[in-house]
Structures are given as C-alpha cells and as structure tokens.
Amino acid sequence: MELIDQHTKSIMEGCKERARDAGLCFEDETLEYIVTNRDLLELSPKLMIPNLYDYWVHDVEVLKEKGKYELYPSNPYETVINTRPAISYYNDNNPDWLNVMIFYHVLAHIDMFQNNIFFRHTWDYDFNGQALSDKRVIARLRSEKGRWVDYIIEFARGIDNLVGFHDTLARMPDGGRTTTTSKLDYYFDIFLQQHSAFKISHYIAEVERYNQCRRQNPQTAEDAFFAEIERQHPEFQALYQKYAERGPERSLDPIEHIMKHSPFLNREAHQWMKTVIQVVRLTSLFFQPQIRTKILHEGWASYWHEKMFMQDDRIQGHEVEYARVNAGVTALPRVGMNPYALGMRLFQHIEEMAAKGKRSFAYQRIRDARRRARYDQQTGAGQAFIFDVRTHYCDFMFINQFIDQEFVDRHRLFVAGKRLNRQRMTWEYYVQSRDAERYRQMVVDSLYHPPHVTVDPQRNENGRLYLIHHFEGKPLVRDFIANTLLGVEYLWGHPVCLETSELVPTSPKEEAQPQVAPTGQLPEAPRQPAGEWRRVRYTMEKRQLSREIID
Amino acid sequence: MAPDTDQTARTERLRREEREGPQQHHLPPREQARVGRQPPDVYSLNDLDVLQGIPPATPPYTTCLQSIDELLARDRQRAKDGFPRKIRVGRMIKPGTRGKEKVVVVPTTVEEKLIHDQVRDPQEEEQTSGGSGEGEPGEVIGEQPVRPSGAGSGPGQGEGGEHEVESSAYDLGRVLTEQFELPNLKDKGKKRSMTRYTYQLTDRHPGQGQLLDKKATLRRIVETNIHLGNLPDPDRIDPSAFLISPRDKIYRVLSPEKDFESQALVFFLRDYSGSMEGKPTEIVVTQHVLIYSWLLYQYARQVETRFILHDTEAREVEDFYTYYNSSVAGGTQVSSAFRLVNEIVTAENLARDYNIYVFHGTDGDDWDTTGAKTIPELETMLGYASRVGFSVVERSLSMTRGSEVSRYLKQSGLLEAKPDLLRMDVLNEDADETRLIEGIRSLISE
C-alpha cells in the first residue's frame, strides 16, 4: 500500500479546512492509502485493519448466507478505519472532483468516530498499533503452542459477539457515574432493594424520612438517619463494611467470566490462553460501535458530502457526474434498505424539524395539517441539534426516536412485503404498509442485535457454567449451538449449560398441509408461528450435546 | 458581473454541456448479477463499493486450491484432537465472465456463534424490507420468478464453448475421496496397456547408476577375466588375481515401465425435458460433476465418459459442457436413454474392456408411468454394468408424493435384488452440497 500523492493530499487538507469551518471536529493527522486489488485481498479478510492477527479462517472463503452481519459485526469492508491517525483507502484513478466528494464523506466519518460517545472506549489508543502488538504476541505463541493457539482463537471468537459492550462504556471513567458508593447509596440502591421485605411504599417513606432529617438539621442529617436504621437493622453496619471492602460488583460478560473463573484457564500452564482470549475480546469490542452506528454513520457522511460539495467551487464542471455518483449512493431503493439514503434524509429531516421548532410540544399539539406545514419558529437550532444527535445517538435511538409519520410520508416510504404467488411461481413484492410505526419496527428489526447471554453465577453448580439467553422473541440459530458450546466447554474445562427459548411445535399434523398464500389482499397482523415458546436447556458435557425442555 | 447574470451564465453552460457534452442520459446497464438477488439490507452496502466502485475482492481460485491441502491436513488434525471438522469443499463456482464454465473446488467454512435466528412461519414464506415510491398498501409493485430463467443463469442455458472441467475435477475427486472417505473401487482386470508409466529399477547400466547389481557385476568380471586369460582353469578359480574394469560394475537404474490399469467408462444420462428446468438440472449436473471427479481420481484419470441427454428421444453429446448446458422443452421417456446406452455398449463391445458405470439424473417424471419399457432395458444393463445409479430430484412444491421413476423402480424389486448393482438416491430440490455428497456415497458405496 502506498500513500496518496502530494497533490491529492493537498486536496484533502483543503477539505479539512472547509469541513472544520462547517463545524466538523477531528484530529489533524490522517493517513490516506491507495489500495490495489491485491491489497484488498489481504485487507478484506482482516476487516480492513492492516495489522490484525492472523487466523486461518481468513484464508478460507467463509460461508455467509446464514447470519451474515450477525456473524461478522464489524462492517468489514469500509473505507475509513477508526484508529489514530484515521486511515482511509482510495482507488488510484479517482478523478480529483470525486476525491473531493469522498474526502468530505471520509471526514464526516472521522468526525463521528472521534465524537460519538459509543466510540468512547476507542478514543484513547491507536487500534492499528495495538493490533500490531497483538499480532506479534499471537505469532510468538503460535510458534510455541502450535495449532492450539488457533483453537483458542476459534473458541473465543465463538462467543466474541456476547461481549459486554454497554458495560464497557458504562465503566469508562467519564461514564457519568461515580465508582465509589457511599453508605447512603448502598442503603438505597442495594440494601433496601435486596432486603427480604422490600416494599416500594417503605422505600418512598425512607426517602422522605431522609429528606426530613436534612430539613431539620443539614449537618447531622446522615447520622440521625442511620441511627434509626442501625436500631432497626443491627446487621446493616456489618453488611456495609463487607460491601465497602469488596467494592461494587461488576457484571462480567461471558468471556470475562470465563477468563476470571475458569479452572482450566487459570492453571499455570494455560495462562497464555487468556492473552489470546483477551485479544479476541478487545478486537470485538473495538468493532461493536461501528456496526451499531451504520445508518447514523453513513447518513452523517452522506449529509456532509452533499452539503459541503454542493458549496465547493471544485464541483464546477462536474455537476452532472456528481449527480450520477451521488444518486447511486443516496437514492432510496424501490425495494430494500440503503443506510446512506435513509440516514441522510433522516438527518435532513430532523435538522429542519429542529430549525423550525417542530420538536416541541406546542407543535405536536397542532392538529390542523396546514398550520403544521406552515409552522416555523426560526429557532436556528437545526445544526446544533444534529450535532447533538451525532454525539449521543446510535442507530437504534436514531431510528426509534426520529422516524415519524411526517418523515415516512415525505419520502413515500413503505414496508415492502415479499410473498410467493403459487399460480405464477413468482415472488411478489407489494406495499405492505405506509404506517410509520410499522416502518420503524421493520428497520429496528433489521438492525444488528446480538443475543443477550449472561452467566448466572448462582447456578454454576458442580463446576458447570450456566449461560442464560435472555429471550427477546427470537430463538438462536440451532445449528451453531453445538460447536459454540463445545468451544466454551473447552475454555471452561467443565460442562456448560445454555438456557434458551425455542419454538416447540404443538400439533405437527397441521404443518403437513401447505396452504396457498392469499394473493392480492392485505395480510393482517403477523400471524403467530405454529407452536409455543418453551425454555430449553442445552448441556455440553464431554463434547456431547444434550437438549431438554425445562418448562 | 452581477450574481444573477453569473447564475444564468452558469445554468446556460450546464445546459450546453448536457446537450453537447459526452454525458449520456440512458441508464447505466443494470448489473446482471444483481437481478434475482435479495433486496439490499442495511449492512450490505459499503463505502468502497458505492462511492468508489471498488467491489469486494475475491481471491483467485488458484490460491484457494493451493491451500486446500494445508486446510485438509488441518481438518484431519482437528478430528484427531477431538473437535468437529470445519472445512467444507466441493462448492461449485461457475464464473461466467468469459462465457466459460469452470468447476473449481473452493474450501468454505462457517464461524459458528450464538446468533439470533429469523422467526418465520413456515407456511407464510414472507419477508419484509424497506421500500419507497408510489403504490397503495396491498398493491403488488413487482415480481421475480422463483426459478431463475433466461440466459446466463446456471445450467440449462448458454452458448457452446470449451469445457474446463478436467483441470480441477481431478483435484476435486481427490478431495472427495480423502475428505469424505468415499470408498475406493475394486479393479476389474488389467486389460489394456495405458500410456502411463511407473518407474522401477529395471534397466541395467554399466559404470554408474542407483543400485549395484552384484550378480550381474560378478558375471561381467568373470567374463572380462576370461578374455584377459586370468582364468586358465575353471575348476580352480582364484578371484584375488582378477582385474576389475570400471565398466564391469553393473548398476540398476530407474526407468519407465508400462503399466496396466483398470479403466472406467461412465455414462452420464440426464433428462433435459422442460420439467427439469432450474433447480433439478443444477442438482443433477452438480452431482454428476462430483461423481465424475471422484471416478477421475479413482481411475487415475483413466476414465472415459459418454454423455447422453434425453427427453422422449435420446442423443449422445460430445462433451460435458454441452451435457451441462443443454435444455429443451419436451416430454420424458427414460427408456430411450437406456436403450441408447445398451446399443452403444453392444455395438462397440465395451463390456469386455471397461468397468461400466451408468448414472442417470431425472426429476422422476416419465411418461412410461409403469416402467414397462424402462425396466427390461435396465435389466439388460445390469448384466454388464458395474453400477447403475439413479438420482431423482423431486420437486418440493409438486403435489404428487413420490415420482414415477422412484415408484416403478421400487415396484420392480430390482433395488433389493441387486443392491450391489443398482442404487437410487432421492433428493429434494433444495439439497446442498453436503447432501449431494451423501447421495454420492449411497450411489457408489460397495
């Protein structure tokens, strides 16, 4: 890979100045590389990170039909890499005007990488440099331990989508929460709530009593308050002492739990495995925010490349070519989703809403369509508002909060259904709904969302590891359970249980009769699938998987 | 210049450019590959592709092939270590760019994780996606055929051209045999000299070579010394007086030897009637490619193949490519193909020299619903063939359960009577490669 030439670099620097003037905020240094097809062959299996550790699966064409992005939550094929300095990749024969447009797009990406709080845990280090050191560590271990390094990578990657991304963010020093818990916090947050006879009325009464103590005598309020408690609960002081010594309990994600408590990994001879697992875990954590901000990211970048390039004098003479390229990127598809198109329009929409003061209760109360259309408070707060969204939102919040009927109607969006027409043997695409609620739900359903799996330490009996899948309406892919648990069992060293929910057919006879799908008429609300949801427990013991229904 | 005139001038310039410039207004050609694909989802688009037109890089197949041995060795090691195998091979890639179909082995694998599955009502077969534009709720805005049709969509269509199956089919056969432990075959006599050689230490060479032939050397020494007069009395030989010329030393050297190997003749038969269109054809030819590759390896490339297509009439075609790509609309008479095979075998007296295999692929349709014509032909064939294998691809959407061919084969009792000669594999049209290989195992196992 080679860097772009000086001429192109000067274009980039010019773009940076203008982007800064427009309000974008990013570090000075960036690296731009020309990539050839050969470079891409090496980069793409490594998620575009030049220094990612080697792993044999990268050499194999990986089947991706099943699960696609669920399995590869890394936006594997992006132009911009979130590292310090940010890296971006270019064709060697882009014309200058196209590079100007792409540079604006790239700068908006970098702006989001360096300002969106979901990326906070990636701000303090150079991932590419870290990856290089990780790669060396793994290469050294591989020379010592041989293929076992690859097994450990494989097994750790099996559960690397279950990393506690949000926990990691919450634990950041500027996570907005105090890490030390005072006696008072302990009383209200933990002691009262875990107390056997916990009642909300009692809790409120206690809050009131505390407030009263403060009103009577602010200086000694706490002493007076706790004097009463110690009379009622003599054990309180001891419990608090114990708690204070132990520190607040952090919730561990499955990988952390295994690393901390696995009898197998904690043997002297197996310590090296933890290094490997940690590399896999941190790599996964690094990519987590990227997949969760796809629409936000591409929308933001498309919003800015359009806005900036239309104002740029370098567009002159290339308006038509730009229009074509831009339409290819940001046109709403007739059927299908385009994060560029959707995100950009949503940013433009909310900017306008905020600028006109439409994000207010006064506006929401207006029922008259004409008055709604004319409503304009001229707040001038549009830009500030979208910058706030860029800083504090992820895809789910962005979609869930801002897709409203006005937006759906304005861009004539709809939920497209696909069904089989048996007479003609074709797939029919049809307009299913133009309801904002349904549209929003459809987008939300298509977003990346790994299953919520935690370890239940209470049920880790006899050395086994008990994983609980907190059911959210979707089962796990069954074919993958066996090999994933096999890996976990290896890392844990003892049997592993996974509790999940599955659809158990109630009457298998009904399924035998194929029904002809109704054609041409609007289907009602999604039908309940045949069968009922039951809790199921998988147990992996000595590399044998067993399954039982437990309720 | 006032901003207004500036603006007008600019607009005028743009208009002129559009009118006279090199830009064109017709739509860019729609990419063939995108037709028939799923509509894009949120994560299927990326910057490099949409902004700069850099498509995801696909590694050349040759690199995949080079590393396949290494990967398979790793996979065997996995089995030894007690972990399940992960490499899947036998995936057919058919790059259609230069109009040449090529069969290549690509190792594939999947990384298994705990991920969400789609909850889908099996009866409803419905997916939702986003959309934009005109249309009332309920209105159908477009449709897509369930089975691909038209040019360039898999087997059944396409122009003639060189088929390049051979080059990598051998590799595929090796991989199939090793990876899936497909059985090895019995020899059926060594009858015909082949053009292949094995190298053995058979030739002798004085003076230098790989291995000293002591007996021959001694004989030469004696001969030389008789000529020199060093051996006056044959009854009292004194070897210490012998002179040894360097040329007396006789060595054996490696030399090519003709080898005799058994050989196979495979008849591939397939129904190419209208009902086979789409998936069934694809499955049948894919399975036949796999069988062909396996035999190619088994017989160390000493495989001759004959390809026969039939609807109501059978005809022999010259190569795999035509076999793979032909399609007509027409009825189905399975017996016609079998009769043609019998005629060819008798006319060319093939049964004497070859192990004959017959593989027939069909969707199970036959106008001869009872098998009255097919069964006698089949019985004749079983008289000389080493194996006759039927692949019946049944349509999952067809209402009839069990096709004609599978029904009359079962009724004839031949499957039970000659299990070593006749096999049948009934597949679903959604069968994947693993299933296909499983099918091959049942078709060719001892």
Image (tube, helix red, strand yellow):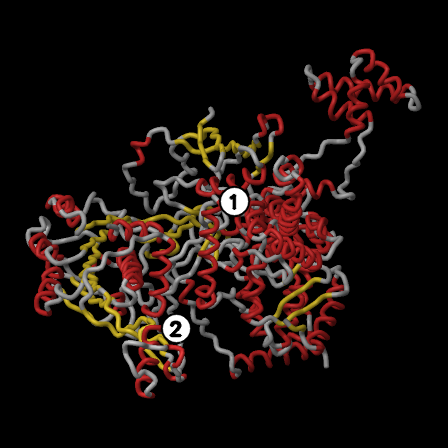
Q: Which amino acid, mark 2?
A: Leu
Answer yes or no: is residue B68 visible.
yes
Q: Quadrant of residue A55?
A: bottom right
Q: Nearer the viewer, residue B42 or B143?
A: B42
Q: Position of residue B217 (x, y in %)?
A: 35, 77
Q: Position of residue A183 (x, y in %)?
A: 82, 25
Q: How many marks?
A: 2
In the orientation shown, which residue stands out farthest toward the top?
Answer: A231
Q: Position of residue A9 (x, y in %)?
A: 71, 74
- Mark 2 surroundings: few (<14), some (14-19) or many (≥20) residues within 10 A: some
The residue singled out by tag 1 in the image is: B113
Q: Nearer the viewer, residue A387 or B361?
A: B361
Answer yes or no: is residue A380 visible.
no
The residue singled out by tag 2 in the image is: B211
Res. B294 mark: none
**With respect to residue B231, does A494 lie above or below?**
above
Give the letter of the chain under mark 2: B
Q: Nearer the viewer, residue A485 or A267?
A: A267
Give the letter of the chain under mark 1: B
**With respect to residue A243, does A472 lie above or below?**
below
